């Protein structure tokens, strides 16, 4: 029994070390792993400090590794499959970020903040991350585009964010598919059915159909 136990312990240890070194995590559909995260929940540049939970809202204060405030991130469930994300920068009275960390630019810090908040949306088992274009600056929009966010058009509303109360006139949303290998066909084909498109346009009055504004702001216009 002792020999079998030792052999089993060694097997478990070997499997654990191999999994960590390969960074594969546990391979299971729709569950967050080290691969599906696209990285970790930690960073050498910024620190997330979780605030008390208020209903469906999750909030974190964000600081640099040196303790200087960067801003605040929030996520909000907007359906069973999507989480709305929002970043509010620290007040302008705070010292300039580049002065706090000369080797790091503001853009690099924000890209890291965005990566970490999207990873937290993945950890909530959401399929989509969504944000309002009006809540982000032109500089931030480029980071969203690099992270895979695209304009949410009317034909995709039933698939991505079917809650009409979150959609107002002339409001443009961006969305990111968090599991490309699982949901790509559904988003590109299932959400584009003509009947769903007609329903979305009639229900929302053509809101979100103007992609040119979003693409131009995100630096993706042709």
Image: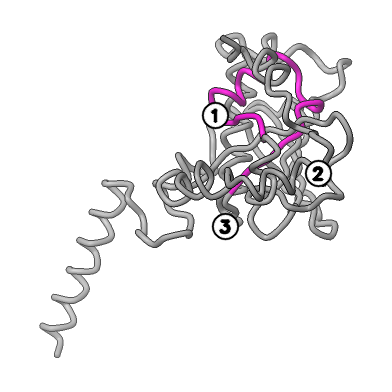
- Mark 3, residues whose alpha carbon is within 10 Å: few (<14), some, or many (≥20)? some
Residue annotated with mark 2: 202
Q: CA distance from mark 1 to mark 3?
A: 18 Å
Q: Residue at x 79, y 58 (%)?
A: 56
Which residue is depicted at the point 70% across and 31% down? 63
- Asked if disc 1 and disc 3 are in contact, CB closer than 8 Å, the reply is no
Given residues 94 and 181, the one toward you in this image is 181
Task: Judge depth for marks 1 and 2 and give the one in front.
Answer: 2
For label 1, the SS is loop
The numbered disc on residue 201 is none
Q: Per the image, is 33 magenta?
A: no
Of 192 and 146, nearer the camera is 192
Left or right side of 20 for 182: right
Where residue 25 sits in the image (x, y, percent)?
36, 55
Above-or-below relation of 205 to 166: above
Q: Nearer the viewer, mark 2 or mark 3?
A: 2
Q: Residue at x 69, y 45 (%)?
A: 157
Q: Looking at the picture, how far across and down is residue 64, in whole percent? A: 66, 27
Q: Which residue is mark 3?
A: 125
Q: Magenta stretch?
A: 128-152
Quadrant of res 47: top right
- Is residue 134 on the magenta stretch? yes
Dot 1, how many residues are within 10 Å of its Cα: few (below 14), some (14-19), or many (20+)?
some
Give the secondary structure at mark 2: helix
Q: Which residue is mark 1?
A: 147
Q: Residue furthest left?
A: 3
**From what the image shows, is residue 119 above or below residue 135?**
below
* Distance CA(mark 2)–CA(mark 3): 31 Å
Mark 1–mark 2 Cα distance, whole angstroms, equals: 31 Å
Q: Residue at x 58, y 23 (%)?
A: 145
């Amino acid at each position: 029994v002792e020999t079998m136990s030792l052999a089993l312990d060694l097997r478990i240890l070997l499997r654990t070390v191999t999994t960590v070194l390969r960074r594969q995590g546990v391979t299971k559909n729709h569950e967050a792993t080290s691969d599906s995260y696209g990285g970790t929940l930690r960073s050498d540049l910024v620190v997330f400090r979780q605030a008390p939970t208020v209903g469906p809202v999750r909030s974190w204060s964000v600081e640099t590794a040196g303790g200087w405030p960067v801003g605040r991130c929030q996520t909000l469930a907007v359906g069973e499959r999507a989480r709305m994300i929002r970043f509010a920068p620290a007040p302008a009275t705070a010292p300039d970020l580049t002065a706090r960390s000369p080797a790091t630019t503001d853009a690099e810090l924000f890209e890291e903040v965005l990566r970490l908040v999207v990873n937290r949306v993945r950890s909530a088992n959401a399929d989509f991350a969504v944000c309002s274009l009006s809540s982000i600056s032109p500089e931030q929009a480029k980071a969203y585009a690099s992270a895979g966010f695209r304009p949410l058009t009317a034909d995709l509303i039933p698939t991505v964010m079917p809650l009409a109360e979150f959609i107002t006139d002339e409001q443009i949303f961006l969305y990111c598919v968090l599991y490309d290998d699982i949901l790509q066909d559904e988003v590109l084909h299932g959400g584009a059915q003509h009947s769903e498109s007609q329903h979305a346009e009639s229900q929302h009055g053509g809101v979100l159909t103007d992609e040119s504004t979003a693409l131009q702001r995100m630096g993706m216009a042709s």
